[in-house]
Amino acid sequence: MKFIRFASLFILFCFVSSCEKDDAPFNSGDSLYSGIDTSASPSQLTGIWSIYNISYEGNILNVPVVYYECGRDFLVFSENGRYTEYLFQNSGCTYDINDLNWELDGGIITLSNQFNQSEEWVITKLDDNQLIFKYRFDIDEDGLLDIVTLYLQHYTPIEIDMVTSTFWENPDEAYDELISFTWQAYEGFNAFDKYEIYRSLGDNCSLSSAELIATIPDVNVTEFTDLNPPGEPFLCYYLKVYTDQGLLGESYAQTIWTETLYPSPVALSQPTVVGNTIQFDWQASTDPYFSHYELAFSNYSGGTGSGKQEYTVATINDIHATSFVDEMPPYLENPYYVLYVHNIFGGRTSFVSSQVTSYWEVDYKREDIIDFQKIESYAIDIDNPVVFFYGRESGSGNTMNIHRFNYQTKQTEAISNLAPQYGTNVTIKCLDTGYGKEIIVEQASDLFVYDAITLDYKYTIDTGISGLDDFTYSNLGYWILVDSDEVFTFTRDHANFDLVDSKPHFPNHQSSFNYQVFALNGDKVLVGHQNESTSYVYALSSGGVLVQEQIVPISIKSGWDYKTQYNAGGNYLINLLENRLYSTTTFSILESFGAPYFPSGTSLNGNLILGSNNDPSWQITSTSIHAKEAVIYNRNTGQVNTVSTIGYPQVIFETAFGDIMSISSGLKKNDIHDNINNKADLFLEIIEVP
């Protein structure tokens, strides 16, 4: 690639036509580096030059002026290492610029461009009046480079604006996130007056509407950084140059899309937990476009993830403020806190920074958070302020275990000493069957028995059933179990079951299992399945014998998630998926309701339907419309009340003490079975019903 463009064009023209020639001696056998003037210095080279002659194969050609109105084409070696070539295009003196970098070392000028292409010119003479150098050029286009000699003299061009065309964004990396410009200093021949910087707004920038924002009287100041721009998405900047003769020239607009400007992150120190508060400290921002700090928390350490959420804790507008105390930390185990810096253009630093530490995982958990990543099932103690949970414990492991949690003291009172060995989808049960209150857990069709106070493992009851789907206990003192074919009654002697009776149920064998059994008032037993449109009702005698009484038009529209519940106080089954109540006296539809749209429980007497309007199918995001609200339907009055809650209600029930209690999540989730990034956030809260 030939960098000296106008000379190259002239050479091609002249040496294939008849240009004016002067005879002069020339040794064509010299190599490119012969006769090099190693004493040539950058100070001698700096300045404005024009090519007057070109020599090739003993012939010296004169380089004419193309446009007399404009003067000669010329080139400039600037002190800042920039080489600029000016080639006039017409009599109006518009010109093309060839802009490169130059270095001089040992008599060799090296020109280079942005693509790391380079070319060498060998100086054979350099003094105050003349510059002679050789370079390679394929004149006859035979694929071989020839050596051409150029003769240059210092040149004083006609006063032309050579400054404003060099008005560019500042290439220095230190200014990447700043609105900064540089230009070539005025080196003309009139007395310099000033530079002026103008700014206009909007995507249709115009110099006519631009505002003068800076006047620079020093000719050597060739950099401007706008430290007080407006917070607009599009900004345009212009340069004007004045001499004692008036306006020399004005630049084209340099357009800045400010959305590409990002603030610099600041270092966030490791937070300090003090009781139930968290102290944050950070370095002050020095960003000239600073808008505010944002302290936020998340359940993920940046990036993306299923159920990722992030919420603002505080917005701080004072650039000099470098501390904050979060007095209401989230209901989330070990939250990630991040400090963002925002600029006036809407830019924000990233969660993760390669320059500084901008986020921390804080070792903090509210005392009322239950120590579970997710809960598979729960059981309510009807005599004490206690709920038993079975699920995956918080921490780094995958242990499934049982906890006893007191919602009045907000303490975990016991953890089972033997974790259940197998996963189970049958809900755990808290029962008193004559051996003290116990927690019963299905395990591979057998029943693990735990003491309800200590959660110490007692023993395993062998049921003798393969494929146990559900179990319950009747007021008559019989255990009722169901598998995919039959319903059974047992009596119990400590760790032993004795079969009393068994009866078949549905003739269709459902491969998906999930048969459910309910012990109803009046010594009735109901067996159903989500794939069956009816249910079987049996009478249970005092001797434990089952008698099939009828097939009723009730479908148990739920599987392992137990979305059908029995309310003994109201004598009904509630289908939580259909929002319907079925009488367990007449076995017909008792009532249907709208809100809550997604019920999860009932009051003990059956009058209140409890739930929320959060759809479990909604996508979980920080901006999704999940509400921290419990919705309560009163069957007697027909009224629906919405009550604000601390967390997102997942399951709502009434305790034996008359409290309406919610298992809530600190962050959004679809249900208590969800585990989002192994972070515990479930807790119990009392709902104040109006």
Image: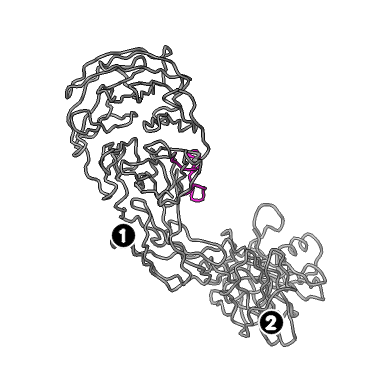
Looking at the rendered structure, the kind of residue marked 2 is Gly
Q: Is residue 331 above or below residue 427?
A: below
Residue 610, image x and y in percent?
43, 40
Sequence-wise first label, 2 or 1 = 2
Alpha carbons under labels 2 and 1: distance apart:
70 Å
The secondary element bearing badge 1 is classed as: loop
Magenta segment: does it hold 618?
yes
Is 210 in front, or is 585? 585
Q: Residue furthest front?
A: 636
Q: Residues within 10 Å of mark 1 (few under 14, many from 20)?
A: few
* Colour pattern of the rendering: one colour
Dividing the image into 4 quarters, which one contains the N terminus?
bottom right
Q: Nearer the viewer, residue 564 or 558?
A: 564
Measuring from the top left, give residue 80's x and y in whole percent: 57, 74
Compared with residue 79, is residue 590 higher up or lower down, i.e. above or below? above
Q: Is residue 396 left or right of residue 136?
A: left
Q: Amino acid at mark 1?
A: Asn
Residue 433 rendering spot, x and y as whole percentages: 22, 28
Q: Which residue is mark 2?
A: 188
Q: Quadrant of residue 29?
A: bottom right
Q: Secondary structure at mark 2?
A: loop
Q: Position of residue 537 (x, y in %)?
A: 39, 18
Q: Is residue 429 above or below residue 114?
A: above
Residue 364 drawn in magenta: no
Residue stretch rendered in magenta on the structure: 609-628
Left or right placement of residue 446 versus residue 617 in this view: left
Principal SS element in the magenta part?
loop
Q: Nearer the viewer, mark 2 or mark 1?
A: 1
Give the numbered dot on residue 81: none
Q: Residue at x 21, y 33 (%)?
A: 450
Q: Which residue is mark 1?
A: 276
Neighbour tally class for label 2: few under 14, some 14-19, many 20 plus, Cα within 10 Å = some
